[in-house]
Every structure is written in C-alpha cells, then in structure tokens.
Amino acid sequence: MSDDMLRAPAEVKYAEELDYLESIDNGPKPFTWRLSPRMIRMFILGSERSDGIDREIPQKWFGDRSFVERAIVTLASDRGLLLIGDPGTGKSWLAELLAAAICRNSTLVVQGTAGTTEDHIKYSWNVSMVIAKGQSRESMIPSPIMTAMERGVIGRFEELTRSTSDVQDALISILSEKYVSIPELDDDNIVFAQPGFSIIATANSRDRGVNDLSSALKRRFNFVRIPVVTNKKSEAEIVRFRTEELLRRHQIELDLPPTLLDILLQSFADLRSAAASATSDDEKLESALSTAEQIGVLEDAILHSHFFGDRVLRAQTLASSLVGSLARRSPEDLAILNKYWHGVVEPRSKKAGGEWPEFLEGGREAISTLS
C-alpha cells in the first residue's frame, strides 16, 4: 500500500513494525493507546540488545532520549505537547512518529499559516447541504482537530506561532475544556473529546515575535525544546538515514562515498561557525544551515548524479548542489560563499587533498555561474 503513495505516513510505512510491537506489548497503556510508553520509545529510538525482542527495531528519530520520554509522558498526562526548535531539528517528524505509535493515525493535521482561521481547528459547513437541508451534524465539516476529539486520538498543529491570536485563543478552550460548542445547532450541539485525545503542536523558534503565544495558551502546553544537532556523529547518522530512505524510495543504486559525507558535514560546520561570529545579518547566509538543508543538498546531488551523471556521487556535483541550495540572496549569499571557498576550502584542499580539490573547483564554477 505504501508503494502507491508519494510519501506514506509513518503508520503506513512502518505498519508491520507497529503490528509486531503491538503483538508483544504487555505494558500498561494510557487511555486507548495502541502501544505502551516503553514500546513507543522503542519504536522511535530503536531497540537495544537488552530489550530481548526477536527482531531489530531501527532508530527513526535521532536525538536525546530524554526529549522523547518527556514528550510521551506529557501526552500520557492529557496535556498538550509543544515541540519547539529551529528549522530542520525534526520536530514534525517526531510529532508524526508519536501520533503513529499512539493511535496509528498521524494525518489529522492543521497547518498553521497567516490564513489559518478558527474554522480550520473547529468546523465549517457544507454550503450545498445547508441550502438543501439546513444546518445539521450531517452538513457540518469537522476539522482535523475536532475529528481527533471525537475519535480520542492525536491531533497535530504545525507551526502554531504562524497562526493569528484568534486561532491560538480558540485552542485554549479545546485544551482546557475538552469540548467544542456548536451554537448553530439546537440539539447535539457539543462535541466532547474522547479519552486519548491530545494535541501535538510544533513551533519554529525563529518565528519568535511573529505571533507570540499568550500566557494562557502556554499554560496548556508542556514545552519540549528540540536543540540543533551539533554532534557530528549524530548528524551524520541522520543524514545517512534520510539518504538511504531517498535511495530506496527512488529505487536508485548509487555509490555514496563516506568521504563526501564528511566534506558536507564539515562545510556546514564551517558555515555555521562563520554565521555565529558574524556581526550583521548581511554577513550571514539566509539559510538556517539545518540538518534538513544538508539532506536537501545531498538529495539534489544524488538525483543529479543519477539522472545526468555516471551514477556515482562526485565532489564537484556535491559542491554545485551546496552552492545552488544556499545562494538564495544575490549578491549577499554569493559573496559569503565566495569568501568561504577562498578562505577555507582552498587552503584545506591544498592541505588535506583527497576529494577537497574537486570540491573546490566545483564550488568555484557554481559561484561563477551564479554571479
């Protein structure tokens, strides 16, 4: 079934694994959860030899165990969960995995934008049915959040701080009262949340000041801050994991030299260091230089090598993809990358050798083309 989807949700993609964990799970389960907290942790972080199970469960989210445990405990306590962090830290992926493991449905999602309205988190109406038969529960269109309430499952709210204060205020009553009133109806005019309902929201820490959360809404969420991955080993695992998924999804057989992954990781580390020491925004790349953007650079290079190259990822292609992905402003970003290539990549290519000289030439050519 997952082969028929461009991107299968976690509960479909890992259905066999979830079935197996459910079959061996004898731990206590809150509410109507499909898995116990221990099994949810294992599903997300992977199994260990000491777990003593018959098959290996691969790790799917790479981060501190304590973040996952606190997220699970929060949802077991019937409180809302807010995952907050920089772009590319895996907030949405963790939210999806949690919902998939808890209720086998991660698709009840509201995407927060400036255009999100109260209807998107409560309900709206099928206009043609209202004209024909009047307002009733049949002619009502429940939001993903209301559907989650009725089913007693997890609802998700992406990019909460990008929504207006009116939308955020509407969440307060849902999280505190656990019901939604429908004043347009005389009968059957309250939807009560069933046991197991909760909300996992995400917020981008770089959106601070866009639509700040009120103190009342903050009290209804437990905050779990997801830090930027700075450990090279952990970041390499994340990039490798996502890249292997990409190769499987596209059915691509391509040689990915470990040395090129090291070059990519080192380049991002260098550029982050330069951004941290910059004294103005003009001296920083517009890119957040997140792990997700590293994956995007590698994905671009792999697909280019597969379709237009000799099916071997080369340093020149990687450099071209990196420059093309990070040079968003002209001339500011190009000037920053040009400075990095001359000041860091060039001396390193002379000293380290290996694939750095080809990486140097590929970057120079890409910068020249875009200038």
Image (cartoon, helix red, strand yellow):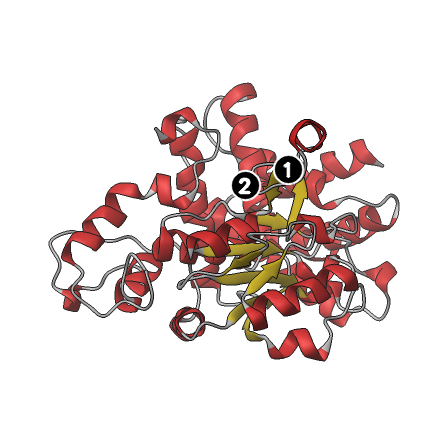
Q: Position of residue 360 (x, y in %)?
A: 65, 43
Residue annotated with mark 1:
321
Could you tell which of marks 2 and 1 lies nearer the N-terminus?
Answer: 2
Q: Secondary structure at mark 2?
A: helix
Disc 2 residue type (three-letter): Leu
Circles 2, 1 touching at the beta carbon (< 8 Å): yes
Q: Residues within 10 Å of mark 2 (few under 14, many from 20)?
A: many
346 up-or-down from 296: above or below: below
Q: Position of residue 19 (x, y in %)?
A: 23, 47
Q: CA distance from mark 2 to mark 1?
A: 7 Å
110 up-or-down from 253: above or below: below
78 up-or-down from 315: above or below: below
Who's the residue at 49% across and 45% down the image?
A: 107
- State the quadrant of the N terminus: top left
> Left or right of 370: which side holds 92?
left
> Left or right of 142: which side holds 114?
right
Q: Is residue 342 visible?
A: yes
Front position in the image: 89 or 264: 89
> Left or right of 2: which side holds 88?
right
Q: Position of residue 56 (x, y in %)?
A: 20, 53
The answer to which quarter of the image holds residue 173 is bottom right
Q: Secondary structure at mark 1?
A: helix
Marker disc for residue 298:
2
100 up-or-down from 314: above or below: below
Front position in the image: 286 or 89: 89
Q: Position of residue 44 (x, y in %)?
A: 35, 58
Toward the front, the furthest residue is: 186
Who's the residue at 73% across and 54% down the image?
A: 340
Marker disc for residue 352:
none
